[in-house]
RNA sequence: GCGGGCGUCGCCAAGUGGUUAAGGCAGUGGCUUGUGGCGCCACCAUUCGGGGGUUCGAGUCCCCUCGCUCGCCCCA
């Protein structure tokens, strides 16, 4: 029989990995709490139309990367490929946008049917922020600052913030026409992918990785020149805001977001240490999306960061020593027990230690019934600071033997009554940190 | 969807056509049914991702297939 395996691109996170994830999640939660951003949770499954309308029919994400299927009621459903569309849908559906500006965050798995590679899986995870009903340039700055500070706090180095303005829809339409005309005139010299994109998504040609195309593009009309006075002014205020907060950024006139709903501010935070998929966090303004999904005209800005990529960076930071190591959960006390009476007392005592209000300990109870030597060996390996030995002898006398595991064998053992053990200050028993 | 690299035990890993597939870590049992970082002993791949083929003989060569991985595309 063939061994069962996870689906391609669907990755198991084993106990050695999950502490990294927990650290990132806890840090993100704390930053959102400080910034008064509230959590929203939406379903993983949505009607396909939400993404088709929200992200754009012509995008690759919608066109060829979605996990779509028909459910038993013949509805076309899709596993969410990103979070923004769902958040906006939920905010409209429950009248959140009608109640005033919303500061929301979300996290969880997303699904895209792509070939897996470094920093990219088919089920991947994002943490994202969405400000709905905020149109002021300061909201762009604050949103970016939250992302930046979060990443800095995680001790991730080698990051750069790239910034661009895509202008208003009118700006973009005008520019698009200009660009298409120019690209058509130079069609012969473009790489095949770029030639394709003239028709499908011409702005993305700017983003081409083909060096010849990039060289050619130096002569192309610039998006910045197509911005209206208002758009220009708006972008200026965003830049000034970032400068005032001393958040370093680089202008990247070629930065074009892949999803249709973006306009005005677009940004990416990239790392030089990630391989081909260098973007850790990407986002921008999407003023038209709420209306497009059936809500009232509502300006909005948001971003999403890729957990897998961030985990990669965090573990690198740890190896480099710029971030404190995360450690697996280790018990404070390992209970070695044997014999009918000893085992019964140990089970009860372990529970008691775990439940004491304000003085709970992390207790691992050995359930093997093996010899004391085996159990003590395991106790040492568990990383526990103490072994608590309970055999029939101790149990019968209402006692426990407390053994410090860091010391030499046999030295420092203490035989205490059960009550005396429970009276010990928990700081003495807990692991450091 | 398209390229490159790789696939020997849970992990690391020898092996490059010749008979029984090293070793290390982890695991299990024992030496020691009541005492600890050791040590010693035993067990732990009828089989080299799978299927065909070449050969007297294949983990080793060829083909197909599956998987992993890196890159393109795209994106977080």
Image (spheres, coloured by chain):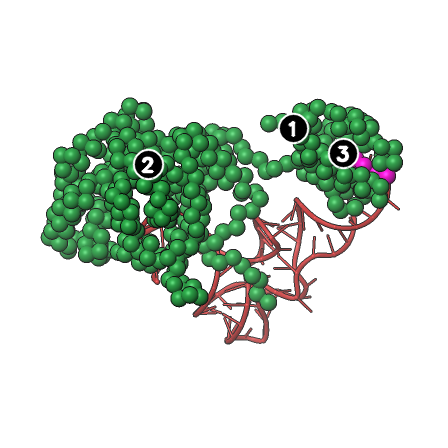
Q: Is residue B21 above or below residue A133?
A: below
Crowd around label 2: few <14 · some 14–19 · many ≥20 (10 Å):
some
Magenta residue check for A395: no
Say which quarter of the image contains residue A269.
Answer: top left
* Chain letter, green: A
Q: Distance between the residues labelled 3 and 2?
A: 55 Å
Residue A411 shows up from this direction: no
**Nearer to the camera, A203 or A96:** A96
**Nearer to the camera, A302 or A211:** A302
Q: In this view, does B73 lie to the left or right of A5?
A: left
Q: Name the residue under label 2.
A: A101
Q: Where is residue A35 in the image (x, y as percent from the top left)?
A: 40, 30
- Magenta stretch, residue numbers: A388-392
Q: Is the magenta stretch mostly helix, strand or loop?
A: strand
Q: Name the residue under label 3.
A: A388
Callouts 2 and 1 in the same chain:
yes
Q: Where is residue A235 in the image (x, y as percent from the top left)?
A: 21, 33
Give the residue displayed 64% in from the left and 36% down from the top: A330
Q: Which quadrant is the N terminus of chain A positioned in? A: bottom right
Q: Which shade is chain B?
A: red
Q: Where is residue B24 in the image (x, y as percent from the top left)?
A: 66, 46
Q: Name the residue under label 1.
A: A358
């Amino acid at each position: 029989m063939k061994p069962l395996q996870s689906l391609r691109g669907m990755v198991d996170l084993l106990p050695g990995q999950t502490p990294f994830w927990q650290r990132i999640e806890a840090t993100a939660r704390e930053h959102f709490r400080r910034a008064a951003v509230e959590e929203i949770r939406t379903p993983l499954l949505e009607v396909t139309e939400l993404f088709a309308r929200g992200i754009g029919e012509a995008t690759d994400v919608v066109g060829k990367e979605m996990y779509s299927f028909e459910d038993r009621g013949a509805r076309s459903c899709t596993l969410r490929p990103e979070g923004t569309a769902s958040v906006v849908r939920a905010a409209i559906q429950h009248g959140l946008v009608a109640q005033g500006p919303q500061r929301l965050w979300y996290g969880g798995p997303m699904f895209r049917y792509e070939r897996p590679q470094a920093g990219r899986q088919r089920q991947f995870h994002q943490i994202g922020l969405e400000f709905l009903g905020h149109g002021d340039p300061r909201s762009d700055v604050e949103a970016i600052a939250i992302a930046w500070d979060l990443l800095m706090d995680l001790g991730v180095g080698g990051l750069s913030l790239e910034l661009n303005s895509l202008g208003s829809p009118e700006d973009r339409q005008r520019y698009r026409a200009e660009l298409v005309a120019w690209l058509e005139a130079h069609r012969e010299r473009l790489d095949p992918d770029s030639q394709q994109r003239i028709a499908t998504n011409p702005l993305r040609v700017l983003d081409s990785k083909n060096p010849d195309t990039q060289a050619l593009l130096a002569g192309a009309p610039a998006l910045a020149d197509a911005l209206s006075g208002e758009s220009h002014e708006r972008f200026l205020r965003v830049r000034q805001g970032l400068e005032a907060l001393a958040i370093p950024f680089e202008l990247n006139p070629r930065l074009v977001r892949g999803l249709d709903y973006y306009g005005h501010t677009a940004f990416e935070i990239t790392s030089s240490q990630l391989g081909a998929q260098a973007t850790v966090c990407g986002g921008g303004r999407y003023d038209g999306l709420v209306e497009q999904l059936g809500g009232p005209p509502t300006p909005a800005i948001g971003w999403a960061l890729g957990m897998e990529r961030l985990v990669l960076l965090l573990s690198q930071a740890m190896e480099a020593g710029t971030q404190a190591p995360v450690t697996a959960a280790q018990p404070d006390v390992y209970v070695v027990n044997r014999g009918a009476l000893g085992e019964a007392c140990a089970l009860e005592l372990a529970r008691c230690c775990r439940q004491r209000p304000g003085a709970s300990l992390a207790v691992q109870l050995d359930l093997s019934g093996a010899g004391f030597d085996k159990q003590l060996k395991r106790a040492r390996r568990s990383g526990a600071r103490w072994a608590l030995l309970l055999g029939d002898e101790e149990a019968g006398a209402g006692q426990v033997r407390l053994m410090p595991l860091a010391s030499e064998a046999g030295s420092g053992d203490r035989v205490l009554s059960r009550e005396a053990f429970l009276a010990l200050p928990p700081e003495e028993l807990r692991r450091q940190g």
